[in-house]
Amino acid sequence: MSNDKGFSDEQKQFLSGFAFGTDVARAVSRLPVLSNSGGSGDNGTSITVGGKAEDTLPVGPEKIALIAQRETTKSGKKLCKEEQAKLEKNPLDMWDEMQARSDRGEFPKGTDVFLQKFHGLFYVAPAQDSFMCRMRLPGGLLHAWQLAGLADLSDRSAGGYLDVTTRANLQYREIPADQAMNILYGLRELDVVSLGSGGDNIRNCTASPLSGIDSQELIETIPFAKRMHHYILNSREMYGLPRKFNIAFDGGGTISALDDTNDIGFHAVRVNADRATEKFPEGVYFQLTLGGITGHKDFARPTGVLLRPDQCLSVAGAIVRVFVRHGDRTDRKKARLKYVLDDWGFDKFIAAVEEQLGMELPRFDDSLVERSNVEDRLAHIGFHRQAQPGKQYVGVVLPVGRITSDQARGLAAIANDYGNGEIRLTVWQNLLIPFIDDADVERVQERLLELGLDYRASRFRAGLVACTGSGGCKFAAAETKTHAMQIADHLQSQFDLESPINIHLTGCHHSCAQHYIGDLGLLGCKVEKGDDMVDGYHVHVGGGWGQRQGIARLLFESVAFDEVPDLLAGIIRGYLDNRDQGESFIEFATRKTDDELKSLVAVTA
């Protein structure tokens, strides 16, 4: 007699599926058991062998970060609150939650404020009761249609302007709570993402902004920044870091990518025929440097490793994975790559990277390579010839990195009408429009001036960098952008310099404007003046990068802002009156002691 007699086809399928499920259940009962003992969501998935919690092992692409967290607690240490928040909720899995909040017109609370930064959304109260949104623009490259679209999106859902950052990137500000998801969707519709642009992630990958158009460069680098960008986006392990992380590619051209201020720096060099070996034939390679974090007074240091261009991505991935495994998860102040290197030393760290890669990293004597020395500190401002005959690019001066939506649309139109539609951002908070015909230069100049922008800058404006400041950042102690413009106006009315003096204003110890690498670096603080606490700065001198590498040293502490412009004028006047022939400001500041510099200011003030 048939077992299925009297059953319909639908019933037969159900019974067949039930029997199959029973067989699977019996088999699964003999396998390791999935548990959520490590936390909720994807982060908590682990395998329990034999039912013992102490034998659980995380599974999935996030496992290296989860293992690092578990090993921290097993050693008797306590995870910092941010690590605990990431353990309890995977920040990459918050889309529905963020949508619900946006629909209700609410901002995040508690640790969700931190976790939402993984999507590029920063709730910046109390400075502003709104979101800031940071993007990812690898190599600082975008197209005119994107810039115009970003301007329109800012008008609809943000503050009606855009800020250029010191990572050749863009930010929105003044985003209301109910517009958060409109921003995230709108960016994606413009082929721009914000995922991983904040929180404990690898930030925007930078490159030489003249990549492909610089006659002096050794190699194009924007393609590497773009590949690195997509590698990060498609490798979930890259989101498990204990702290933020920076990567830069410098092609050895006329505008620096500031690779020596990054956690990983790839700097192009040449091995000439007379130094070539079988292992290193004549050609262009990248020197690998590690551990740059100028806010903690350290530049990326050479490793002795020399890489072919095609090796950079896999090596960077291995470095990040080692950092994920071994970075500090108890103290945010010590959670950067620099501190792993300080603790381990370079040899041990490189050995761990080699183990991760499964290969030995190639070494070459740094003194035997040819390193370019063609950087031009004014190459990001004004009109300059490209490698392509008959073509020029223009570096547009932006007032401490900010442009209105109308100006952004105007710049996009210029790039379309007179260029090839490209816009290139720089780490100096400005942008370039390339591929302008020689015959169109005069018309482009007119169009820029009509927008209220300029292609000309004083030696002070050309090197002026400022973070958001207290107007938009809860950490900042001073209104840096406004102060920066006032300082530049004051100084350029008194001095006409042959070469730039870079002035960097940062509002807090996070040093987003990298005050330690400025010729003059200003760190915001509050200063007691009478019965009031007013904006002020700690004044540093003698910073630099690249060939002029140096960490600026503190010269004056807690100077009220209304005294700062005259103080800086005194320093510069002392330099001009007492410098040696052809001596740069950093050379002068390095040669003089602190007391000598202070005495010069006292005499010239």
Image (tube, grey):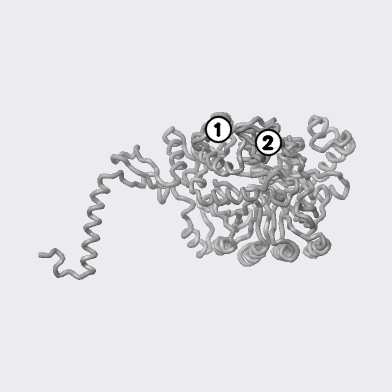
Is residue 497 shown above or below 441? above
Residue 274: name its quadrant: top right
Disc assigned to residue 271: 2
Locate the N terminus by quadrant.
bottom left
Using the image, tell me which numbered label, if any, was put on residue 569.
none
Can residue 553 be seen? yes
Q: What mark, if any, has residue 350 been given in the picture? A: 1
The quarter in which the C terminus is drawn is top right
> What is the crowding at mark 1: few (fewer than 14 residues within 10 Å), some, or many (at least 20)?
many
* Residue found at x 78% / y 45%: 377
Percent across and percent down for residue 522 are 73, 42
Q: Give 146 or 117, whichever is nearer the viewer.
A: 146
- State the residue at coordinates (83%, 30%): 596
- Image label count: 2
Does residue 596 sit above or below 417 in this rendering? above
Residue 511 position in % (x across, y down): 66, 43
Q: Is residue 22 left or right of residue 399?
A: left
Verify CB contact (< 8 Å) between mark 2 and mark 1.
Answer: no
Q: What amino acid is labelled 1 in the image? A: Ile
Residue 215, image x and y in percent?
75, 48
Whichever of labels 2 and 1 marks the residue nearer the N terminus, that label is 2
Residue 259, image x, y percentages: 66, 42
Using residue 236 as the reference point, say whether residue 12 is left or right of it: left
**Mark closer to the observer (2, 1):** 2
